[in-house]
Image: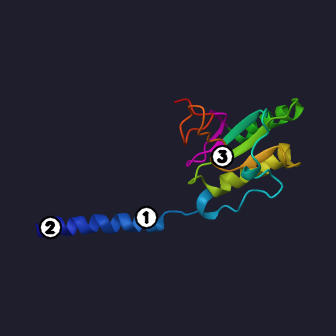
Amino acid sequence: MKGFMICRWTVIACFALLAACRSNVTYDYACPTPLKHWRPKSEGIDHHAIAVKIAVDAQGTLTWNRAKVDEARISHYLGIARTLFPQPFVILSPAPDAPCDQVQKIRALMDANYCGEGWRCGEERGWWQPTMFGIRKGWTLWDKR
């Protein structure tokens, strides 16, 4: 029984050490606020606006409307978006534990290639989380559940 207790406390100490050593350079912890000239969530999206979602997950994987992409593809798609009429609204949607350096890279890429005027881009989790018309709270328009 004594050996079991020592083993249990050793495991608990190891988990505590791992938790303390975990990198806290994540979106929620270390990333500065979104760029000031981007549209804030509080202003919402125009009623008939076309919207595109760029997501960054915990591993730094990028998606464009749920399709896995790389930075070059995002740059290419933003170039195409500039030629469209009406121009789509682009939302950067990082996961809370997304790597901050990846989020900042994508912000810079979006700003340089598309969002310079500001009104075409926004950043925050939960931009679209409707609670009316049968859409469950917490779902986004991109979810296919």
Q: Is residue 15 left or right of residue 69?
A: left
Amino acid at circle 2? Gly
Q: State which mark lies toward you, 2 or 1.
A: 1
User: Does label 2 or label 3 sit earlier along the sequence?
Assistant: 2
Q: Residue at x 86, y 29 (%)?
A: 84
* Start-end of magenta stretch: 55-69
> Which mark, by number, is residue 93?
3
Q: Residue at x 89, y 48 (%)?
A: 117
Q: Residue at x 61, y 42 (%)?
A: 129
Most extreme residue toward the front is 133
In 3D space, how far apart are the residues under numbered discs 2 and 3 (Cα atoms)?
48 Å
Q: Where's residue 92, x and y in %?
A: 70, 46
Residue, disc 2: 3
> Which mark, by number, is residue 19?
1
Please tell me which residue lies in front, 89 or 46.
46
Q: Residue at x 58, y 46 (%)?
A: 57
Check the image and report above or below for 11 versus 94: below
Q: Callout 1 environment at 10 Å: few (<14), some (14 to 19), or many (20+)?
A: few
Please tell me which residue lies in front, 51 or 22.
51
Amino acid at circle 3? Ser
SS label for mark 1: helix
In 3D space, how far apart are the residues under numbered discs 2 and 1 (Cα atoms)?
24 Å
SS label for mark 3: strand
User: Does label 2 or label 1 sit earlier along the sequence?
Assistant: 2
